[in-house]
Every structure is written in C-alpha cells, then in structure tokens.
Image (cartoon, grey):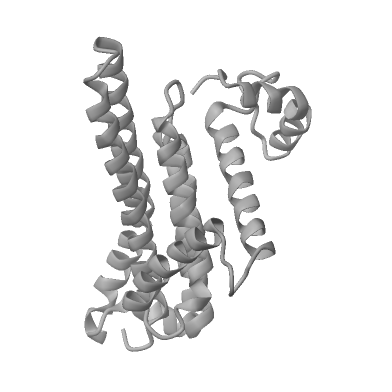
Amino acid sequence: MSESLAITRLLNHVFAGPVDALLGVVGVHPANAAAPINDAYALELLIAAIMLAFFVTVRATLSVEKPGPVQHLAEMIHEFVGGQAEQIIGHGYQRFQSFITVVFVFILSCNLIGLIPGINSPTELETVTLALAIATFVYYNFYGFKEQGVGGYLKHFAGPVWWLAWLMFPIEIVSHFARIMSLSVRLYANMFAGGLVTLVFFSLVPIGVPIMFLGLHLLVSVIQAFVFMLLVTIYLSVAVAHDH
C-alpha cells in the first residue's frame, strides 16, 4: 500500500521523525524516510482509536435502566464472543474474553473498512496478518506456560504415549509454529483475493455489477474475522486444558 490517504499524510507530517528514530533503534530503515507510515498502519491506528473511543463511551454511559444503542451493540458483541468462548474453553473463559473480543472486533473492522471505495483493508497486507498471528501465538503460549508451568505445558507436545515422545515433540513444535503461517496466510489470502476481485469489477463495470462483489466482500470479511477468533479460542482452550 502506498501513501495515499489524508490520515496517512497527516501522521507522516507529524510523526515521521519520531517513527524514523524508533525504527532506527531496531535497525529498520524505511525506503522513504519522509513517509515511514503507510496506509495500512494509518488505518490500523484509526481503527484502534475508534475502538478505544467506543469502549470508553460504553464504560462511561453504562446504564441498567436506560441502555443506549452503543451499550446494546457492546452487549451483543460481548454475548456473542462470550458464548463462543464458554462453549470452547469452558470454565474460566472470562479472563480471555477481552483479548478474544479485541481480536475479533479489530480484524472485523480492518476487513470492513475495505468496503469504502478507494480504501484497501489493512488485512490485505501480509505483514499486518503476520503481526496478528504472532500476537496470538505469543498470547496463548504465555497462558499455557502460566497455567500449567513449564513442565506441564511441554507435556502437551510429547503426546499421550511416552515412548513416542521423541517423535511427537518435534512434530508438535513444528505444527505449533506453523499456526503462525496458517493464521496469517488464511486471513491475508482471502482478504487480498476479495479486495482484488472487487477492484477489478469496479474498474470494468463501475455501476451495478460491483454491488454483488461488495456483498461477497462483506461476507468474506465477517467469516474471516469469525474464523480467526474461533481459532484463537481453540488454541487457548488446548493451551490451558489440564486434561489434555
């Protein structure tokens, strides 16, 4: 994604210097030092700011007697994500619900913003989906070690038969790291393909026909956000399960 959005230009104008300095600390040098922030990152920041404002508004306007539309929406999201987490994780799912909810809402928002003409979904960029996958990987493994201890969690990788542990352990380690690629590529490939098809038909037939593909893009956006959330929940359930 090249710099093209007004918010990207604004962020680069204000923060290009500090961002360049920060990237230089970790040895990264942007191709364009005057514009180190691209559209995808700018949109992610915008979505994060909107989400923060949404949650702050919900918290500030909570009411039992007269819940507003914002509270109703928040409760719908909470009940939907909580229902999925309770079914998959079971007892104690509440401590993970905030992370799962943020992942779901953030990815869904990133996907849906691509429905606006002239804007590409941030999740059409492979580095964005890779970052989400790595964050998920770190999160569920952290709670696996925290919940069961180092020895107990590593037993997950050894399999149920002790004399096959030497074979199962490396296979399980590789399969766990493969989840990063799986989560990343699945989301990226679907969103990139959906955005590309929509763009092609908009350029060929700008009126009428593309509406069908916008509907398809909407469906793909919702499904991919749900699938990502579902996989995060499954990985967490396996990581914290004591009877695995």
Given residues 239 and 71, the one toward you in this image is 71
Q: Where is residue 29 drawn, in percent x and y? A: 65, 27
Horizontal relation, residue 52 to residue 210: left or right: right
As displayed, is residue 49 above or below residue 148? Answer: above
Which residue extends farthest front?
66
Q: Where is residue 55 drawn, in percent x and y? A: 61, 58
Quarter in which the C terminus is drawn: bottom left
Q: Residue at x 41, y 40 (%)?
A: 111
Q: Residue at x 51, y 58 (%)?
A: 102
Q: Residue at x 47, y 69 (%)?
A: 141
Please count the marks in the image: 0
As displayed, is residue 9 above or below residue 156? Answer: above
Given residues 118 and 15, the one toward you in this image is 118
As displayed, is residue 92 above or below residue 143? Answer: below
* Res. 138 in view: no
Q: Where is residue 92 drawn, in percent x and y? A: 46, 83
Given residues 32 and 156, the one toward you in this image is 32
* Res. 150 in view: yes
Q: Where is residue 99 drawn, in percent x and y? A: 51, 64
Horizontal relation, residue 18 to residue 76: left or right: right
Q: Residue at x 42, y 47 (%)?
A: 108
Which residue extends farthest top?
204
